[in-house]
Amino acid sequence: MKWHRSTVVALLSAAILVNGIPVHTTDCTIKSQRRAWHTLTREEKLAYLHAEQCLMKLPAKLGLPGTRTRFDELQACHAMQAEVTHGVGGFLPFHRLMMHAHEYLLKTECGFNGTQPYWDEPRDAGKFSKSEILDPEIGFGGDGVPPSNCIKDGPFVNYTNGIGPGHLISDHCIDRQVNDFVSQLASQTFVDQCYQLQNYSTAWPCIEAFPHSGGHGGIGAEMLNPISSPGDPIFYLHHTYVDKVWWGWQALSLPVRLSEITGGNIQDPCVGFPEAPNGSNGTFPIPFPPNGTFPFPNGTIPGCANTTTPVIPQSIDGDPGNVTTLNHVLNMLGVISNATVGDVMDIGNDLLCYEYV
């Protein structure tokens, strides 16, 4: 089964609740602190993992295709909009809001008292297979086991995911193909290269191409799928780290970079998903081609054939053309309220109210 055109268009249209509104600039009183996974205590790690398991048990509420749980609904929010949230100017803002949505559900529906952690990926670059993230007891379980590449241990070993691969709707396990070679892309060297770029127009593609690809490709399988990757709960620690990288770049020139946004609204079909080369099976050339150019046709991987790609609206609420602006509406499909790009530019505002430590 795959997304039905009328269902996708109706859901994307009906969930748009907010028109463009001014940028949030109000500072919150006390910022929550997002910390690296390896700095958490055993008890803090277990509390997070238990909250994630809770989200995987709560019944779905929104009627999105293929969803049975609240965890699935977050994944569907990502999968159903993949072509307008990757390879576009809204890539970083959309995922920032999605991490906020995940943390919000953990807190409000599963009693989680902590904050969304991130994976300090440069610390493990080149050796993901040895990362404590993959601990079977106080981590997310280990690598997949051939031939299915399903994970065989950890707290999520028995979870049946109904979304993916790609836009398909089919029951499957959480699978992984950890690749230490590809995980080199998560090194600080690539982050520093992005930090040297002076404009969002060049910094965003750099972040999406390098630090972003390192985490996805280093874990592989479900995580390497640019559409259905939130089916692996490691996704949320990875993209919180990507958000930290973006904030690190913003913080180099405040307040200017609290309003700097650009890029297209619709994915370039000649580039597709720059983080997932067609048919690569998780093997990436290092170094990548210069200047963020990727000769990967369609940008999909096996299981994500173009024939499964849904027809999506060719305009974004809040943006009259194909250039991302601060009024661009980030659609959460009802998981939480929508927000504009302008609403999420400052992580210390009254909507987000967090900092990285």
Image (tube, rainbow, N blue to C red):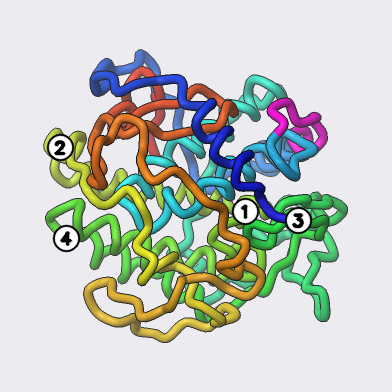
Residue at 73 percent across and 26 percent down: it is 61
Could you classify mark 3 by the number of other residues whose Cα lies within 10 Å: few (under 14), some (14-19), or many (20 or more)? Answer: few
Q: Quadrant of residue 346?
A: top left
For residue 234, the mark is: 1
Mark pair 3, 4: CA separation: 43 Å
Which residue, given by chain and number where applicable, does mark 4 sit on?
197
Q: Is residue 15 left or right of residue 110?
A: left
Q: Quadrant of the C terminus?
A: top left
Residue at which label 2 appears: 254
What residue do we see at 60% from left, 66% from top?
A: 307
Counting residues from the start of the chain, the first of labels 3 and 4 encountered is 3
Q: Earlier in the sequence, mark 4 or mark 1?
A: 4
Q: Which residues are magenta?
A: 54-63
Q: Is residue 37 above or below residue 123?
A: above
Q: Which of marks 1 and 2 precedes in the sequence?
A: 1
Residue behind mark 3:
1
> Which circle's residue, 4 or 2, is located before the other in the chain?
4
